Image: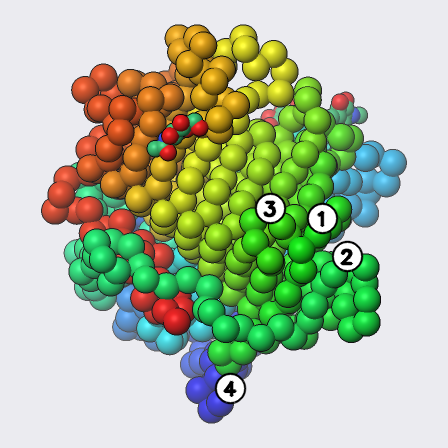
């Protein structure tokens, strides 16, 4: 308890409200004048490890002493990002206030207000909890997510650039993403090279020949996977049933609403969702942590929706039938689907921003964009995921173990043929600790799709992934790739976009689609000595948080 209290004090003193002034620090010594702080040799060195060194070196760093430690530098870089984030938040408020009557701009600004608030929370817990607690991997994961939300706001606002106020905000957000990227790069260097800033280097990826050190395998029979998942023997705190009988909620959302906020200390709020089809949109908010959905089995407990991005004012993000923000979310034994009809657009079944989340024995059904693994660390075990275009996508660090990934027919003229990408990972910055790992999964088509495929294999093309964003990262390890996977393996997004920066790796896959002799030149084989980088332990630190019982 004492240490928790200390941590919350720290987080208050480091990153309080948007009106924070760097001259009113609570617990730190007076700060150096700005000119002195940015010329500190420690800052000069640290800035060399960033992607935007000039911007980095031009900032007024609020350092606590004339001889700052490397962590002081990182914390002050985060502080600078946080201050700029506060400015961005108030500019978004102004846009909202002056956009009455402009529907599109109002939607974009509202969306920004929501996701920048998530960015703030992840930034605060990076500086207030993870770094002071020595939890560098958590710090990297959380600051990666903070950057993702800033990038998301910037990108959404660009489509409603019709006033100078919006134009200015877009410019500010761009700078904000660069400042956050810089702080994140420093954090990556600190993790990789230690506290001596002279050793720091700009973030590198596998394409540059760099693999993260791995602390050995992650347990489990192969050393890569994990013998854990949703714990057995959980007792229900709430029950949902179709007839809403005695002691039973009639909707999943009503049970989520009944969950207490910020459940922690190893406690969970377990919701048993009895067999039945629940037609509803479910949202698990940021404050509802450690919520567990226990169904009666895939295909028995079904949560279904049909929102799609073709509807006015609905973004892909908001189409999700089930959308989860609270950390520590778990689900087992259920189906989540989006049944948006033909000629629809993006239609998400499940979307998650839950760090430390565990999904086991669940089925996700959709077409384009079925599973939006949006941010942070997610572990999927023994799941079935069906879709066609980009149907597993997002910028999370997600691990798929023992899953069945099934292509299903497109809804319009399925016999005509198509190009499907199983994944579209969306990493925008090489310092983000995100990527998709598939291990011991089957990539196949549904029976219906395979019948179509076999009738005309030449027109039905399926690829393991395509780069939604510049630093897209996806690997398939020891998976069974059925014949539907094209010999080229991977497809471009648009011309040569991201082809030099993405990392698409394969290792010891089997099945007729696994022959790598005709793969596109910009995909890779994972070197055996580096495959441990993609263990549950190394990639998502599963050994620290995944239940083993
Ligand atoms: C608002 O967005 C919709 C969908 O993107 C678009 O069709 C419409 O033209 C936009 N309205 C204005 C006023 O820009
Ligand atoms: C926004 O629109 C203005 C005016 O058309 C243009 O000059 C500016 O470059 C645009 N900004 C962005 C970020 O696209
Ligand atoms: C792939 O799907 C087809 C059609 O349902 C099925 O015949 C085949 O056995 C599946 N492959 C594997 C490895 O399960």
Distance from disc 3 to disc 4, alpha carbons, whole Å, reads 45 Å
**Marks 3/2: CA distance?**
15 Å
Left or right of 321: which side holds 334? left
Q: Are marks 2 and 1 in contact (CB under 8 Å)?
A: yes
Q: Residues within 10 Å of mark 2 (few under 14, many from 20)?
A: some
Asked if residue 166 lies left or right of residue 419, the reply is right
**What residue sits 71% from the left and 41% below the top?**
305
Vertical comparison of 274 with 423: above or below: below
Task: Judge depth for marks 1 and 4 and give the one in front.
Answer: 1
Residue in the image at 47% along x and 69% along y: 232
Q: Is residue 137 visible?
A: no
Q: Position of residue 137 (x, y in %)?
A: 34, 62
Separation (CA) of disc 3 from disc 1? 9 Å
Mark sitting earlier along the chain (2/1):
2
What residue lies at 38% left-to-right and 21% top-to-bottom?
484
Estimate the x, y position of residue 302 in percent, counting from the top left: 65, 48
Q: Quadrant of the C terminus?
A: bottom left
Mark sitting earlier along the chain (3/2): 2
Q: Identify the residue at image location x=28%, y=66%.
A: 70
Identify residue for label 3: 299
Task: Check contact, mark 3 vs mark 4: CB within 8 A.
Answer: no
């Amino acid at each position: 308890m004492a240490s928790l209290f200390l941590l919350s004090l720290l987080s208050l003193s480091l990153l309080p409200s948007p009106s924070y002034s760097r001259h009113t620090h609570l617990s730190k010594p007076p700060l150096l004048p700005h000119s002195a702080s940015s010329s500190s040799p420690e800052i000069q060195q640290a800035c060399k490890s960033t992607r935007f060194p000039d911007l980095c070196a031009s900032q007024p760093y609020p350092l606590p002493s004339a001889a700052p430690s490397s962590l002081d530098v990182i914390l002050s870089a985060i502080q600078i990002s946080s201050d700029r984030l506060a400015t961005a938040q108030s500019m978004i408020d102004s846009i909202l206030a002056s956009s009455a009557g402009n529907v599109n701009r109002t939607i974009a600004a509202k969306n920004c207000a929501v996701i920048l608030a998530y960015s703030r929370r992840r930034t605060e817990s990076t500086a207030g909890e993870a770094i002071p607690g020595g939890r560098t991997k958590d710090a990297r994961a959380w600051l990666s997510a903070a950057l993702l939300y800033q990038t998301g706001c910037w990108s959404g606002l660009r489509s409603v650039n019709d006033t100078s106020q919006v134009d200015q905000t877009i410019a500010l957000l761009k700078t904000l993403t660069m400042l956050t990227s810089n702080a994140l790069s420093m954090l990556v260097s600190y993790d990789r090279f230690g506290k001596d800033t002279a050793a720091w280097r700009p973030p590198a990826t596998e394409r540059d020949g760099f693999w993260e050190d791995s602390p050995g395998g992650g347990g489990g029979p192969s050393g890569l996977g994990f013998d854990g998942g949703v714990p057995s023997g959980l007792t229900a705190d709430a029950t949902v049933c179709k007839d809403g009988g005695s002691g039973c909620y009639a909707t999943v959302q009503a049970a989520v609403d009944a969950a207490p906020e910020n459940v922690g200390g190893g406690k969970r709020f377990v919701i048993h969702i009895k067999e039945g089809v629940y037609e509803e949109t479910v949202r698990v908010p940021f404050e509802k942590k450690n919520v567990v959905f226990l169904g009666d089995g895939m295909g028995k407990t079904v949560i279904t929706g049909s929102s799609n991005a073709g509807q006015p004012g609905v973004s892909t993000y908001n189409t999700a039938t089930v959308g989860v923000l609270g950390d520590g979310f778990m689900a087992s034994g259920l189906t989540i689907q989006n049944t948006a009809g033909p000629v629809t657009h993006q239609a998400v079944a499940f979307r998650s921003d839950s760090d430390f989340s565990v999904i086991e024995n669940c089925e996700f059904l959709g077409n384009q964009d079925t599973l939006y693994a949006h941010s942070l660390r997610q572990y999927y075990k023994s799941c079935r995921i069906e879709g066609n275009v980009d149907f597993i996508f997002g910028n999370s660090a997600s691990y798929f173990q023992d899953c069945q990934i099934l292509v299903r027919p497109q809804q319009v003229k399925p016999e005509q043929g198509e190009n499907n990408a199983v994944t579209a990972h969306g990493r925008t910055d090489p310092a983000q600790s995100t990527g998709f790992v598939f291990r011991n999964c089957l990539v196949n088509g549904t029976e219906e799709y395979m019948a179509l495929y076999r009738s005309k294999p030449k027109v039905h093309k399926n690829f393991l992934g395509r780069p939604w964003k510049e630093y897209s990262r996806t690997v398939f390890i020891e998976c069974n790739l059925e014949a539907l996977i094209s010999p080229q393996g991977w497809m471009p997004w648009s011309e040569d976009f991201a082809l030099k920066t993405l990392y698409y790796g394969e290792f010891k896959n089997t099945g007729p689609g696994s022959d790598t002799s005709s793969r596109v030149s910009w995909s890779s084989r994972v070197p055996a000595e580096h495959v441990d980088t993609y263990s549950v332990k190394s990639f998502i630190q599963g050994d620290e948080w995944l239940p083993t019982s």
